[in-house]
Image (cartoon, rainbow, N blue to C red):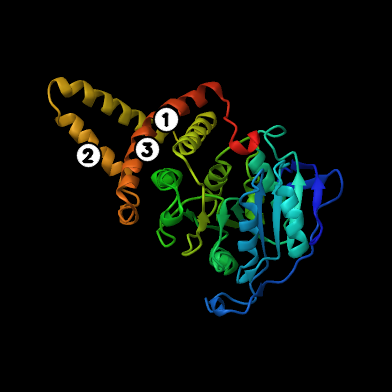
Amino acid sequence: MPGEAIVLSSRFSVSSLGGFSPRTENRELRTPLRGYTYFANENNSRGVRLNMPAVSVAATVLNEVEDIDALVESLMRQTLAPAEVIIVDGGSTDGTWERLEAARLKYPMLVPIRDESCSLQRCPGPIARGRNVATVAASSDVVAFTDAGCTHEPDWLSNLTAPICSGEFQYSVGGSWIDPAKSTVWDVASAPFFGIKLNPNATTKSCTARSMAFRKELWRRVGGFPENVFLGEDTVFDSKVRKLVTPAFPERAKASYQPRHTFRSALRQMVSYSVTDGVLGGRTARLWRNIARCVAEILAILALVYSPIPLLCVLALEIYFAFRLDWTDIRKTPFPTWVARLAFSLLVPWVVAWYQSVGSITKKNRPNRQNFA
């Protein structure tokens, strides 16, 4: 199907062995296996074998017209050319699908799939469903995932998949980063609270699907991505996988991310993630840590009638929490960014404590901006 856009409505069944069996209303998803090839340039001397197995790259999108071109272009510049680049569109109405169709004419390895069941109106876990649709469609045994809003250095795919293709690992996560010089103040201020680094060489163990690769057999063993999870499906998938195998954390495999946050959008994303954690009943230890921070702040303020020392101690701890994960990098940014980071960090425990509790009670997720477009 390279060179042919696919419009379908997918149906999945999970066998007793945990494997996905694809069924579609129109046709089975089949793509020919293609070999692993290199572009001839200076990046080829990175010690990756030329006989590596083919790798399929996949992403899910919905109303991402501003970012889709940059994503596709960066995937097509990889020094290790993927067998195919599969992009599942959940029913975009903003021109994203039309951009994908146009790109398909330029890039034969691009396989756009339009599946409107991968939207919140038709599935409680549309992102997870899109990832499963893409994985089923992949012709390769190794599948690498990324997301809209990301771009990649030419050696991203080779670095991310090398541990898997060498036979040493079955699962690899690369993380994501933002360039402070090209990001908004609130991108930088909120970054560590979303597992994002400010340096492409920073150590990370983030499980984000912006940069993730695995063998399809491993995906089958854990039952695929959880289609009952709205946000954080990659985190749930990661937790199941880590019970079976140890992940690789390759260097220089981070996706370059551009969230373009304002204060409001960053806060809204934190609210959405917190509500989802409550709905799933996960990260209870984090919930109690943040509740403890809220209680400490309240008690410190009440203690002001006796002494300012408790409040000063709490403030010192909050400064530590705000900068502990990336001080080496954020200290290079302008002072207003430091202030924004501290302000956002002070809000985090209150947002998490309240909205995670709300999610655990209501069991209702909050739609994201793409589903409102």
Q: Position of residue 186 (x, y in %)?
A: 42, 43
Where is the C terminus found, in terms of image quarters?
Answer: top right
Q: Where does label 3 land, which residue?
A: 344
The kind of residue on which mark 3 rests is: Phe
Q: Are marks 3 and 2 in contact (CB under 8 Å)?
A: no
Which of the two residues, 347 or 173, is positioned nearer the viewer here? 347
Q: Where does label 2 land, which residue?
A: 316
Label 2 sits on a secondary structure element that is helix
Looking at the image, residue 325 sits to the left or right of residue 281; the answer is left
Q: Position of residue 28 (x, y in %)?
A: 83, 51
First in sequence: mark 3 or mark 1? 3
Label 1 sits on a secondary structure element that is helix
Q: Where does label 1 land, which residue?
A: 351
First in sequence: mark 1 or mark 2? 2
Residue ID at (55%, 68%) = 155
Crowdedness of circle 1 by 10 Å Cα count: few (<14), some, many (20+)? many
The kind of residue on which mark 1 rests is: Val
Residue ID at (43%, 25%) = 354
Q: Kindly report the distance in space between the C-alpha atoms of the residues bearing marks 3 and 1.
A: 10 Å
Q: Kindly report the distance in space between the C-alpha atoms of the residues bearing marks 1 and 2.
A: 20 Å
Q: Is residue 347 above or below residue 153?
A: above
Q: Is residue 45 above or below residue 295?
A: below
Q: Kindly report the distance in space between the C-alpha atoms of the residues bearing marks 3 and 2.
A: 15 Å
Observer-side mark, 3 or 1, equals: 3
Q: Are marks 3 and 1 in contact (CB under 8 Å)?
A: no
Q: Position of residue 60 (x, y in %)?
A: 66, 48
Residue 168 in sight: no
Looking at the image, residue 128 sits to the left or right of residue 155; the answer is right
Q: Position of residue 301 (x, y in %)?
A: 22, 24
Q: Are marks 1 and 2 in contact (CB under 8 Å)?
A: no
First in sequence: mark 3 or mark 2? 2
Q: Is residue 368 above or below residue 44?
A: above
